[in-house]
Image (cartoon, helix red, strand yellow):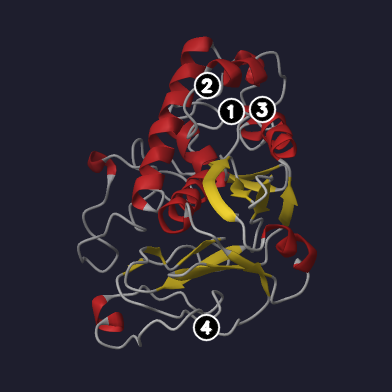
Amino acid sequence: MPEGHSIHRLARQFSDVFAGERLRVSSPQGRFAAGARLIDGATLTAARAHGKHLFLDFEQDTGTALVLRVHLGLYGAWSFGGDETFRGASSIGAPRRMGETDTFDAPSAPADTAADTAPHTPEHDAGAAPAYAGPPAPVGQVRVRLVSAHGWADLRGPSACEVITPPEAAAVVARLGPDPLVPGTGPEEFLRRVSGRGVALGQLLMDQNVLAGVGNIYRAESLFRQGIDPYLPGRALGREAGSALWQDLVALMNDGVRDGKIITTRPEHRSSKDERGHAAPVWPDNAYYVYQRDGMDCRVCGSTVRLAEMQARKLFWCPGCQLAG
């Protein structure tokens, strides 16, 4: 499932390429036909994210405001394309499906996102793209298609997709925990929701009603960087440690928004060579401290990184750096 930084990148991309535009909205698949009719021909006024929810604000000619709420879930993804004025990632979505491809600088008509995973490099795009003549025919199960004068966006496979009113959108946000990528939402609210809880921090950080936008990678990596035992009960997390954890998540997730990928390691803890003796890239070889590094030596203390299951999700941690108690 995409973590919060990817949804904020989506919101930024929608703002960049569609804000202020009157959009044609359809449901090629047919499952969202009724919802599409409600916002077809409306103007996108804003795009925002909270946690793993994307909110696209629309205004009809009558002045009526409506919101398209999307949660990508495990398999959802957006793909984009357009003319020479259209800039952004060609696709953003669930890592299990396709992750995020690089930005493109020429018109393109990507295939189904399940297959379109190759970056749009200069060699791929230069001189090969035809003049933009509108969006391509839908490929795969396109739940929603948004079309402007200069580009298009297709949504496939979301776990939630609905048109709601602004008060209903506000109610969704109110149920969620604070989002480290939304200024002014923490750390006080985060500390309030954690304090007094006897549940392990490793579980609380994945509870979107406690902390919105954090997934398995940010959970594992932030706890490691702060030296916190994932089994520590929430009520045992002191104010100072909790504030430091929040601030580290703010920094890490903002880096993710900027870079389009999660990198949590500090330069001094990265390997300079890969298994074949070649220079090791930062991502993905040196991106993480513990996530998916079970059985390997900790980059900091040399202990063996461990793997366990917590609430049906894989938990990675270092027993040497994240001491119990």
Which amino acid type corresponds to the residue marked 2 in the rendered image?
Answer: Gly
Residue count near mark 1 (Cα–Cα under 10 Å), binned few <14, some 14–19, many ≥20: many
Which amino acid type corresponds to the residue marked 4 in the rendered image?
Answer: Pro
Q: Is residue 36 left or right of residue 272?
A: right
Which amino acid type corresponds to the residue marked 3 in the rendered image?
Answer: Ala
Q: Is residue 231 above or below residue 70?
A: above
Which label was assigned to residue 268? none
Which quadrant of the rendered structure holds the N terminus? bottom right
Q: Earlier in the sequence, mark 4 or mark 1?
A: 4
Dot 3 corresponds to which residue? 200
Dot 2 corresponds to which residue? 186
Dot 4 corresponds to which residue? 136
**Marks 2 and 3 in Cβ contact (< 8 Å):** no
Which percent across, then down, holds residue 323?
50, 25
Which percent across, then down, holds residue 139?
60, 82
Q: Nearer the viewer, mark 3 or mark 1?
A: 1
Q: Secondary structure at mark 3?
A: loop
- Name the outermost residue toward the front: 62
Q: CA distance from mark 3 to mark 1?
A: 18 Å
Q: Is residue 32 above or below residue 65?
A: below
Dot 1 corresponds to which residue? 178
Which residue corresponds to the image point at 72% horizontal and 31% vertical from the top-left? Answer: 175
Q: Is residue 110 left or right of residue 178?
A: left
Which percent across, then down, holds residue 221?
46, 39
Which amino acid type corresponds to the residue marked 1 in the rendered image?
Answer: Pro
**Marks 4 and 3 in Cβ contact (< 8 Å):** no
Residue count near mark 3 (Cα–Cα under 10 Å), binned few <14, some 14–19, many ≥20: some
**Marks 4 and 2 in Cβ contact (< 8 Å):** no
Which residue corresponds to the image point at 40% horizontal and 46% vertical from the top-left? Answer: 256
Q: Earlier in the sequence, mark 1 or mark 2?
A: 1
